[in-house]
Amino acid sequence: MKVIAIDPGYDRLGIAIIEKEKNNKEALVYSECIQTDSKMEFNIRVGVIGKRVREIIEQFSPDYMAIETLFFSKNTKTALKVSESRGVVIFQAVDMNIPVYEFTPNQIKVAVTGYGNANKKDVYTFTSRLINLGEGIKIDDEIDAIATGLTFFAVNPQKY
């Protein structure tokens, strides 16, 4: 079973494919940080994200999507743009009949670290203990996507 996991954004979007292996261990199949050019119009940036997410879905054929819910901050403009990006990503899954599971930042932190107020460094440390991150430096957005995928498997043990 495979899950496509998303840390939403429009400037940078983390994406990961995680597979539950027969030995009941999760394996990172693929991860990427989709980065858009800040000089592009916003609608073009969201289109780039949607197209790339669809390509990854078509390449890896995930069974489920796990996506982080939006954390509202004081910057409403940014929050609205991230929500539009989330909508495009969720559409890609729904359009391809992939069930979508949403997790709050707190749920993800608890599932990966055991502590809801964990910081970015804690999430990275615990994520790297739970799954082999492979070679190369992973951007925070990728780590967050991987943590979101691990949360899916922790919260939905009946699915596999």
Image (tube, rainbow, N blue to C red):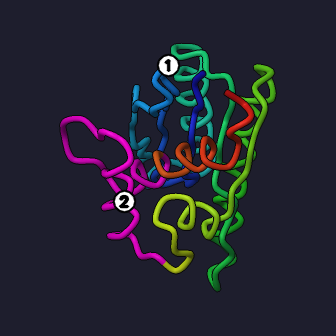
Residue 126's disc number: 2
| Region rendered in magenta | 118-145
Name which quarter of the figure residue 92 lies in.
Answer: top right
Q: CA distance from mark 1 to mark 2?
A: 22 Å
Residue 22 numbered tag: 1
Task: Give percent across and percent down for residue 104.
Answer: 68, 63
- Name the kind of residue labelled 1 in the image: Lys
Q: Residue 66: x percent and y percent?
A: 65, 42
In the image, taking residue 29 as reference, residue 8 lies left or right, namely right
Magenta span includes 22: no
Q: Amino acid at mark 2?
A: Phe
Using a 10 Å C-alpha cutoff, classify the residue at mark 1 as few (fewer than 14 neighbours), some (14 to 19) or many (20 or more). Answer: few
Q: Looking at the image, which is closer to me, 133 or 11? A: 133
Label 1 vs 2, first from the N-terminus: 1
Q: Which residue shows up at 80% across the image and 21% down it?
A: 97
> Which type of secondary structure does the marked residue at label 1 adopt?
loop
Classify residue 129 as left or right of residue 114: left
In this view, the residue in front, 153 or 62, is: 153
Percent from the top left, x then y, of residue 149?
Answer: 55, 43
Does residue 27 lie above or below 44 as drawn? Answer: above
Name the residue rendered at 69%, 75% in the picture. Answer: 72
Which residue is at a point 53% across and 29% down the rendered structure image? Answer: 52
Element marked by disc 2: helix
Quarter of the image that includes the N terminus: top right
Q: Residue furthest front?
A: 23
For the residue pair 148 and 129, the one nearer the viewer reads as: 129
